[in-house]
Image (cartoon, helix red, strand yellow):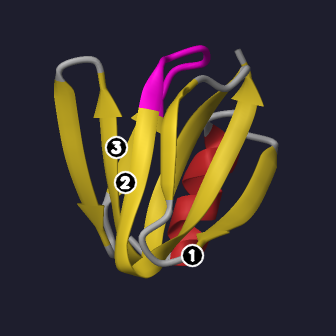
Amino acid sequence: MDRAEFVAMLEREGFREIVTVEREPHNVLGVHTHPFEARALITLGELRLVTGEDEQLCRVGDQFHLAAHTPHSESCGAEGVHYLVGRKPG
């Protein structure tokens, strides 16, 4: 899915806030939550997302989805990570 298709999908699903997130190489964010639902498309690098017992490695072209208030941690590889993300209040 390319960027335009992803943005169109987000808009259809009611995601009004769409931003690009860029994280430095080897960045680690410990367990935290967000007050919004998030759906994202990886555009550079990779992101390891851990929610409870589940671990997901997202690479370029992969998508991830998090419900609002879901405890999770994030870490990225040697390239860092860039992702396009839609957010909507949870």
Q: Which residues are magenta?
A: 66-72
How dense is the environment of label 1, judged by Cα within 10 Å: few (below 14), some, or many (20 and up)? some
How far across and how far down the image is residue 82, in percent? 54, 73
Residue 16 magenta-drawn? Answer: no
Question: Which comes before the other along the chain, label 2 or label 1?
Answer: 1
* Helix, strand or loop under label 1: loop
| Discs 2/1, front | 1
In the image, 16 versus 32, the foreground residue is 32
* Helix, strand or loop under label 2: strand
Please give the name of the residue rendered at 20% of the width and 37% of the height, measured from the top-left corner: 55
Is 25 above or below relative to 49? below
Q: Is residue 12 left or right of residue 55?
A: right
Identify the residue position indicated by label 1 in the image.
24
Q: Label 2 sits on what residue type?
A: Gln
Q: Label 1 sits on what residue type?
A: Glu
Q: Which mark is residue 49?
A: 3
Identify the residue position indicated by label 2 in the image.
63
